[in-house]
């Protein structure tokens, strides 16, 4: 039986999800339906916008002592704390109150172009090291006034999980709003993945040849809104509690997993061109940095596609 | 009176004949020994050689069939049977499944974008 491409597209985690599976398996379509369920399960437990999610219940009990959480929420929280440690706090999952104060208090689809802002919370309202994970008992404790937003890392983690679960059926690529993970190569060929021009969404700046691995992009050009006469975006710098004002506009990173690529792209963007490039090089990661003037900076070995080029 | 009978004395020619018979017998024995040694050595050498062949890895087996792939203007790879490789690249049969028959993708599948 010849391998063929099976695909499914749906909305989850407030973004467009696409999954492509190169398979000979008669179970391929069934596996894709199961993958969609996995996204739904993850969103139901990890979304801060769903009042009945495990994460919302945990945030509602901040300051009330250790709380039991589901294995799924525990796992992603542990990944988030680990990412915060590795980035020395440049990635921080405890910025929920800062985001809410900036006006990002509901799903971006419902937010519109303007939002009302609240006074900025004090510096003591965030800090990843204040999360207490009681591993033996499976309990999590948050200080009063703290809240967790797993946004990007939850999406990257889910993309990785779904890609690995489908890999037994063939080569697979999972894309959730630009967080992309590939396992295997269809017909021995890499997956061609374009990098969108952050200044013009109708254009691309490069086409990557993605093998086993992942790519993710962080950009201040998306998820922007007006609040208090200021243009806001969702990439909050934990050093200031304000939207990042680094010289970078967009960062694309290649890594082994979508979770790692997502965290690294966000970190490099907030560090700026010079420090971000150094940090990526230290992590042995490849990246494409685009600064606010539109200048491109290539870091490491980017797998540019040999035959597909941007016109 | 007891008569002692002595065996008759052998003549010189008889003695020479007996000596000649002994030499032939020894030569025969020597020849037989040498033949046995040579035959044994040859047999061991043959056995050793066949064992070495059996121990060679499968990948070192001679290619039974040469397959020539020729790329068409459309980009497709067409398999052509030919015993003389000529200017074509040749591949063993085992490499065929990894060769893309035609491009799976003609344009980017998707795009990464800011999140």
Image (tube, coloured by chain):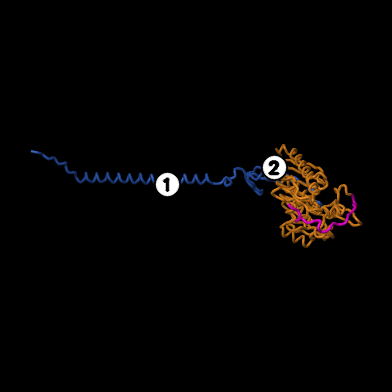
Q: Tell me where residue B52 appears, x and y as whole percent.
A: 51, 46
- Residue placed most toward the observer, A126 or A256: A126
- Residue placed most toward the observer, B15 or A276: A276
Residue A89 colored in magenta in the image? no
Q: Residue furthest left?
A: B1
Residue A40, can we see it?
yes
Q: Mark 1 points at which residue?
A: B41
Residue A170 falls in image quadrant: top right
The chain ID associated with circle 1 is B
Look at the picture and state if B28 lies above or below A254: above
Image position of A191 (left or right of B46): right
- Which secondary structure, mark 2? helix
Number of numbered discs present? 2
Residue A306, can we see it?
no
Q: How crowded is mark 2: few (under 14 residues within 10 Å), some or many (20 or more)?
A: some
The chain ID associated with circle 2 is A
Placement of the N terminus of chain A among the 4 image quadrants: top right
Chain B palette colour: blue
Name which residue lies at 75% across and 38% down: A29
Q: Tell me where residue B58 appears, x and y as whole percent.
A: 57, 45
- Residue placed most toward the observer, A31 or A101: A101
Name which residue lies at 72% across and 60% down: A282
Magenta stretch?
Answer: A112-132
Q: Which residue lies furthest to the right in this view?
A: A229
Q: Which residue lies furthest to the bottom in this view?
A: A274
Q: Name the residue under label 2.
A: A168
Look at the picture and state if A27 lies above or below A298: above
Name which residue lies at 41% across and 45% down: B40
Q: In terms of secondary structure, what is the magenta stretch mainly?
A: loop
Chain identity for the colour orange used in the image: A
């Amino acid at each position: 039986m010849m391998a063929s491409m099976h695909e499914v597209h749906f909305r989850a985690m407030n973004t467009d999800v696409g999954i492509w599976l190169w398979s000979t398996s008669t179970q391929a379509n069934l596996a894709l339906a199961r993958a969609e369920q996995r996204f739904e399960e993850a969103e139901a437990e990890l979304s801060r916008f769903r009042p009945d999610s495990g994460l919302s219940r945990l945030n509602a009990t901040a300051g009330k002592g250790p709380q039991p959480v589901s294995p799924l929420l525990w796992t992603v929280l542990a990944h988030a704390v680990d990412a915060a440690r590795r980035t020395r706090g440049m990635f921080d999952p405890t910025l929920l109150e800062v985001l809410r104060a900036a006006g990002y208090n509901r799903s971006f689809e419902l937010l519109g172009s303007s939002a009302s802002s609240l006074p900025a919370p004090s510096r003591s309202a965030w800090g990843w090291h204040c999360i207490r994970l009681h591993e033996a008992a499976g309990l999590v404790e948050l200080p009063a006034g703290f809240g967790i937003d797993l946004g990007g890392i939850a999406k990257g983690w889910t993309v990785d999980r779904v890609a690995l679960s489908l890999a037994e059926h063939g080569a697979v690529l999972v894309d959730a709003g630009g967080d992309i993970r590939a396992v295997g190569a269809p017909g021995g060929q890499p997956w061609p993945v374009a990098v969108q021009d952050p200044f013009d969404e109708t254009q691309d700046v490069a086409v990557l040849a993605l093998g086993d691995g992942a790519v993710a992009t962080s950009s201040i050009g998306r998820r922007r809104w007006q609040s208090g006469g200021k243009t806001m975006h969702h990439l909050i710098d934990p050093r200031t509690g304000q939207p990042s004002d680094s010289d970078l506009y967009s960062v694309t990173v290649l890594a082994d997993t979508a979770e790692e690529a997502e965290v690294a792209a966000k970190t490099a963007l907030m560090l700026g061109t010079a420090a971000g490039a150094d940090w990526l090089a230290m992590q042995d990661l490849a990246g494409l940095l685009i600064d606010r003037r539109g200048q491109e900076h290539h870091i490491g070995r980017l797998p540019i596609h040999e035959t597909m080029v941007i016109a | 009176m007891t008569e002692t009978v002595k065996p008759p004395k052998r003549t010189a020619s008889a003695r020479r004949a007996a000596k000649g018979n002994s030499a032939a017998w020894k030569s025969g024995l020597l020849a037989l020994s040498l033949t046995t040694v040579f035959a044994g050595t040859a047999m061991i050498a043959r056995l050793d050689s066949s064992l070495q062949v059996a121990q060679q890895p499968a990948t070192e087996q001679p290619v039974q069939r040469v397959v020539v792939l020729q790329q068409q203007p459309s980009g497709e790879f067409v398999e052509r049977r030919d015993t003389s490789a000529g200017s074509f690249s040749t591949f063993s049969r085992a490499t065929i499944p990894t060769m893309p028959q035609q491009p799976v993708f003609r344009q980017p599948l998707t795009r990464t974008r800011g999140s």
